[in-house]
Image (tube, helix red, strand yellow):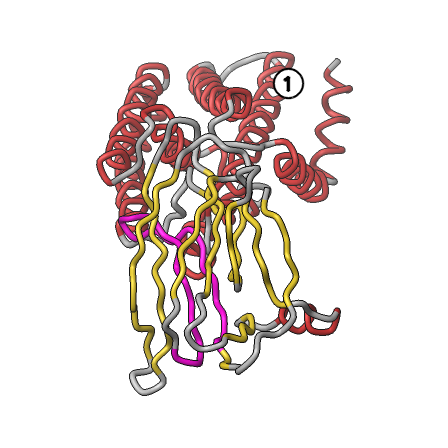
C-alpha cells in the first residue's frame, strides 16, 4: 500500500502544475455552465460542501501535524501513514478552495462591471489562479485560515441578502459580522485542538483576519464590489419600445449590415441616429433572487468636452421584482439630447454599478431603417 501511495505522490509531484492547472480550468468551465442562480438550493449546497471540506481539511491537517510533532519518535510505518494522510489533506484543501473560488468567480463576474469592480474581481482571480502556486503555503495555519475567511466572507456577501430578501449597507455589515463570528468559532476550535501550532500563529493570524475584513469593507463602501446577488441579464438602446399583448417588449433598432455590426461590436460607443425631439429608450433586464425586490436607477449622462467630465442630466428610479430567470424587464427614455457621447449607468440606489450602456448620438433629418425584435 505504501509503495502505491508513494508512486501516486511521485506522479502528482512530477506533474503537479499541469494537474492543478487543468483541474482549475476544468472546474471553472464546469461551474460556468452548471451554476445558474445564486439563490438556487443545490448551487449553495455545492458551495457549502466545499466550505465544509476546506474547514475539515484545515482542522485535520493541523491536528495531525500537532500530534506528529508531539510524538517525534514514531515507527517507519506510522511515518509513512502520517505522510500519506498529510498529502491527501493538502489535496483536499487545495481542491476545496479551487472549487470555492471558481464558483465565486462565476457568480461575481456575472454581477460585475469591470470598469468599477475589477479590484475585487482581481482579488478573487489571484486566489483562484494562484491556488496551485500556493501549495507549499497550505502547511501554514495563517495562510489556511486567511483564505478560508476570504471564502466565508465572499459567500456571506450574497447568501445573506438571498436569505433575508434585502440588500443594503446594513445587510452587508450583517454579512461581515456573521463571517467574523464563524471564523472566530473556527479559530477557537483550532486553538483547542492545536495549542502549540496556534500559539505560534496567533498574532499574524489576528492581523491577517483584521486586514482582510477592512479591505473587503473598503472595497464595498467605495462601490468596488459587484452588486451581487443583483445582475444585468440584458440591455440595449432603442428607437422604439412598447409592451405587447403577450406581456413582452417589442423594440426597434437600426438595421445594420454585417460590416456595421462588426464595427459597432468593437466600437466603445454604439452609433444611434436620432431625429431631434424623438425619444431614445434604454432597456434593461435585471436578475434579482426570488422575493428580493429592489429599486434601481437609470442614470443618464453626457460627456462634456469643455469640462472633460460626465454630466448627469437625469436619474430615473425603477422598481425590480425578483425571481424571473431572464431578469425583470424595465426601461427609461428621454427626448432631449445634444449630439455626442452618452451613457446610461444602471446601478443600485446606493451607487453600485450593475451595468453601463454607451452610445453616440448623431442627428439626422429622417429615420434610418429599423429592425423589430421581441424581448421575451
Place of residue 177 in the rendered image (x, y in percent of width and height, measured from the top left): 25, 30
Is residue 4 found left or right of 265 in the rendered image? Answer: right
Q: Name the element at disc 1.
A: helix
**Along the viewing direction, whichever of 366 and 282 lies nearer the viewer:** 366
Is residue 70 found left or right of 348 in the rendered image? Answer: right
Kindly give the residue lying farthest to the bottom in the view shown: 306
Total labels: the figure holds 1
Residue 195 higher or lower than 175, as above or below: above
Place of residue 364 in the rendered image (x, y in percent of width and height, measured from the top left): 53, 82
Q: Check if residue 358 falls in the magenta segment.
A: yes
Is residue 183 found left or right of 42 in the rendered image? Answer: left
Q: Check if residue 203 falls in the magenta segment.
A: no
The residue positioned 56% from the left and 23% from the top of the image is 89
The residue positioned 51% from the left and 48% from the top of the image is 125
Q: Which residues fall within the magenta stretch?
A: 338-361
Asked where in the image residue 188 lies, by quadrant, the reply is top left
Residue 135 is at least partly visible in this image: no
Asked where in the image residue 270 lies, by quadrant, the reply is bottom right
According to the image, label 1 marks what residue? 80
Indicate the quadrant containing the C terminus: top left, top right, bottom left or bottom right.
top right
**Along the viewing direction, whichever of 186 and 321 lies nearer the viewer:** 321
Is residue 115 found left or right of 25 in the rendered image? Answer: left
Residue 346 is at least partly visible in this image: yes
Indicate the quadrant containing the N terminus: top left, top right, bottom left or bottom right.
top right
- Main secondary structure of the magenta stretch: strand
The residue positioned 42% from the left and 16% from the top of the image is 70
Place of residue 160 in the rendered image (x, y in percent of width and height, measured from the top left): 34, 28
**Along the viewing direction, whichever of 275 and 292 lies nearer the viewer:** 275
Place of residue 34 in the rendered image (x, y in percent of width and height, measured from the top left): 63, 31
The residue positioned 28% from the left and 48% from the top of the image is 349
Kindly give the residue lying farthest to the front in the view shown: 245
Amino acid at each position: 500500500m505504501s509503495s502505491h501511495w508513494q508512486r501516486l505522490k511521485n506522479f502528482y509531484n512530477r506533474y503537479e502544475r499541469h494537474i492543478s492547472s487543468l483541474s482549475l480550468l476544468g472546474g471553472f468551465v464546469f461551474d460556468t455552465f452548471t451554476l445558474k442562480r445564486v439563490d438556487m438550493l443545490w448551487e449553495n449546497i455545492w458551495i457549502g460542501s466545499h466550505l465544509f471540506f476546506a474547514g475539515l481539511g484545515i482542522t485535520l491537517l493541523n491536528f495531525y501535524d500537532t500530534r506528529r510533532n508531539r510524538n517525534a519518535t514514531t515507527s517507519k510505518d506510522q511515518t509513512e501513514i502520517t505522510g500519506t494522510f498529510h498529502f491527501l489533506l493538502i489535496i483536499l484543501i487545495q481542491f476545496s478552495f479551487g472549487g470555492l473560488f471558481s464558483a465565486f468567480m462565476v457568480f461575481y463576474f456575472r454581477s460585475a462591471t469591470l470598469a468599477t469592480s475589477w479590484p475585487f474581481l482581481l482579488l478573487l482571480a489571484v486566489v483562484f489562479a494562484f491556488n496551485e502556486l500556493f501549495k507549499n503555503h497550505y502547511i501554514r495555519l495563517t495562510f489556511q485560515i486567511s483564505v478560508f475567511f476570504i471564502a466565508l466572507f465572499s459567500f456571506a456577501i450574497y447568501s445573506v441578502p438571498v436569505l433575508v430578501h434585502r440588500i443594503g449597507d446594513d445587510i452587508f455589515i450583517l454579512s461581515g459580522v456573521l463571517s467574523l463570528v464563524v471564523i472566530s468559532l473556527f479559530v477557537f476550535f483550532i486553538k483547542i485542538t492545536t495549542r502549540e501550532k496556534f500559539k505560534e500563529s496567533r498574532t499574524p493570524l489576528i492581523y491577517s483576519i483584521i486586514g482582510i475584513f477592512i479591505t473587503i469593507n473598503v472595497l464595498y463602501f467605495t462601490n468596488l464590489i459587484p452588486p451581487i446577488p443583483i445582475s444585468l441579464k440584458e440591455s440595449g438602446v432603442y428607437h422604439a419600445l412598447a409592451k405587447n399583448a403577450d406581456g413582452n417588449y417589442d423594440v426597434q433598432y437600426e438595421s445594420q449590415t454585417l460590416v456595421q455590426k462588426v464595427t459597432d461590436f468593437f466600437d466603445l460607443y454604439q452609433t444611434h441616429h436620432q431625429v431631434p425631439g424623438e425619444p431614445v429608450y434604454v432597456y434593461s433586464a435585471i436578475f434579482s433572487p426570488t422575493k428580493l425586490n429592489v429599486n434601481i436607477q437609470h442614470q443618464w449622462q453626457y460627456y462634456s468636452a469643455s469640462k472633460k467630465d460626465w454630466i448627469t442630466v437625469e436619474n430615473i428610479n425603477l422598481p425590480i421584482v425578483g425571481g424571473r430567470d431572464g431578469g425583470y424587464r424595465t426601461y427609461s427614455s428621454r427626448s432631449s439630447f445634444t449630439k455626442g457621447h452618452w451613457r446610461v449607468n444602471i446601478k443600485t440606489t446606493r451607487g453600485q454599478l450593475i451595468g453601463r450602456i454607451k452610445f453616440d448620438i448623431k442627428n439626422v433629418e429622417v429615420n434610418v431603417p429599423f429592425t423589430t425584435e421581441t424581448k421575451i
